[in-house]
Amino acid sequence: MKFRYGVDDIPPLGELVLFGLQWLAIAVPTIVIIGKVVAALHFSDAVDQVIYLQKLFFVTASALLVQLLWGHRLPLIIGPASVLLVGIVASQGSDVNAVYSSIFAGGIILTTLSITGLFGYLKQLFTSRVVATILVLIAFTLTPTIMNLIISSKAAGSPLLNLCFALVLVISMFVANRYLVGIWKSTLIIWTIIIGSILYLVIFPQYQWMGQASDFTSIATFTRNLYFNFKLAPGVLIAFLFCFLALSVNDLGSIQSVGALTKPGDMPKRISRGISFTGLANALSGLLGVIGPVNFSLSPGVIASTGNASRFTLIPAGLGLLILSFLPGVIAFIGGIPAVIIGTTLLYILCSQISAGLMVLFSSMSEFKFESGLVMGLPVMLSIIISFLPVSVLNTFPDMVRPIWGNGFVVGVLTVLIMEHIIYPEK
């Protein structure tokens, strides 16, 4: 495929800025969506939630700029890892310091595995059936979170009205996805957030927009909450190590997909550097107490639709994210998006995740076998059961094993590895 600008080409200033704004429009919604979900889990105070988002914008911007200049050096957008959201949601009963200490440790371990070359041995565990199952598991284990966002007790309307609003909105998103092309299709999420929020305010005028810029002018930066208390909880750490296995596969797949599209050469070194810096970015996230980033697999679609493969066009986007991290008023306003809109867009994103998982599965085999359905089916069913267990049941689990056996994603990953490599190994 021929591109107007190659990986190492620098477009004229005007086009550089315009392409950068497009990438920025793609990056911001995912940071806000996942960041707001996690911030609401940790903090009830709006100011603390804004500071969390500030730190998340800062980490994402730093990781993006470092990857573009010294890491994989490919036109890949970065954002919060949904698989780590699974781990954080499943660890709500644990000490928050243990959660982010585990993210810090996971980032260091991932960097070490990549630098030493040991990651190559781990890749052998991740056959196409395992990768496909993991992608689907991420979506299914976040279903309770989506449900709580849509029928949130803080919503303006009744649960039924909010559910109806969400259904109409998500179906509208798929209709738009069917007919939109180019950058309009790539920025569908941000248009959904804008139009959906306006419609929600019209239908439910009693909704109070949480983020008023004037309420946060006193927060110059997020430096007042920069602290790190290392706390090791073995159960939480083990659960997050499974999450990091999935994150590494996601990161590897994203780098390889862009590499296959742009063909920049020297891919082994790009992959090694890219995964190493992803690990370091997650270590930084753990230090700052925010969810870690990963390279997103949506980048090839954006590159193909715009005809632009220049990595330098993402630098204005990275600088824009960095500037936003020091503008609490702007982040507070963006953070006022209704929970119903957040839940609906997250539902749309995770439907795409399921689609990607099924594509991985079916594209890797000439014939779909009954055993492949079993390898994928049991982990998915067990993960759903665990994810919807009542809190009263989870509280009966011993503290040491609760983060593992009470985590639907971890149970699903363990099960698919057993099914794939022990019970139904492919010859």
Image: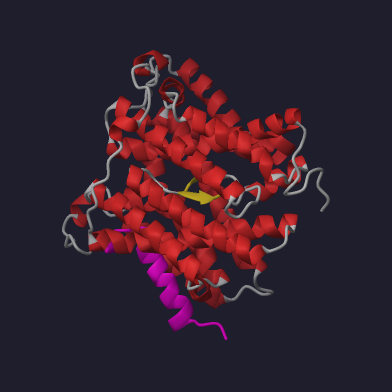
Q: Residue at x 50, y 33 (%)?
A: 322
**Where residue 114 sits in the image (x, y, percent)?**
49, 66
- Closer to the camera in the image, 379 or 165: 379
Q: Is residue 373 above or below residue 11?
A: below
The reply to whether residue 79 is in sight is yes
Outermost residue on the bottom side: it is: 427
Residue 415 lies within the magenta run: yes
- Closer to the camera in the image, 410 or 250: 250
- Closer to the camera in the image, 48 or 8: 8
Image quadrant where residue 289 sits? top left
Q: Residue at x 69, y 47 (%)?
A: 301
Is residue 80 found left or right of 308 in the rendered image? left
Q: How is the image coloured?
A: secondary structure
Q: Residue at x 66, y 58 (%)?
A: 257
Q: Quadrant of the C terminus?
A: bottom right
Chief SS of the magenta region: helix
Outermost residue on the front side: it is: 70
Image quadrant where residue 337 sits? top left
**Where residue 392 sits in the image (x, y, percent)?**
18, 51
Q: Residue at x 67, y 41 (%)?
A: 312
**Where residue 286 sits in the image (x, y, percent)?**
35, 49
Q: Is residue 417 above or below residue 76?
A: below
Q: Is residue 395 above or below residue 213?
A: below
Residue 399 lies within the magenta run: no
The total number of labels drawn is 0
**Where residue 247 sits in the image (x, y, percent)?**
47, 58
The span picked out in magenta is 404-427
The reply to whether residue 164 is in sight is no
- Closer to the camera in the image, 269 or 330: 269
Is residue 155 found left or right of 347 in the rendered image? left
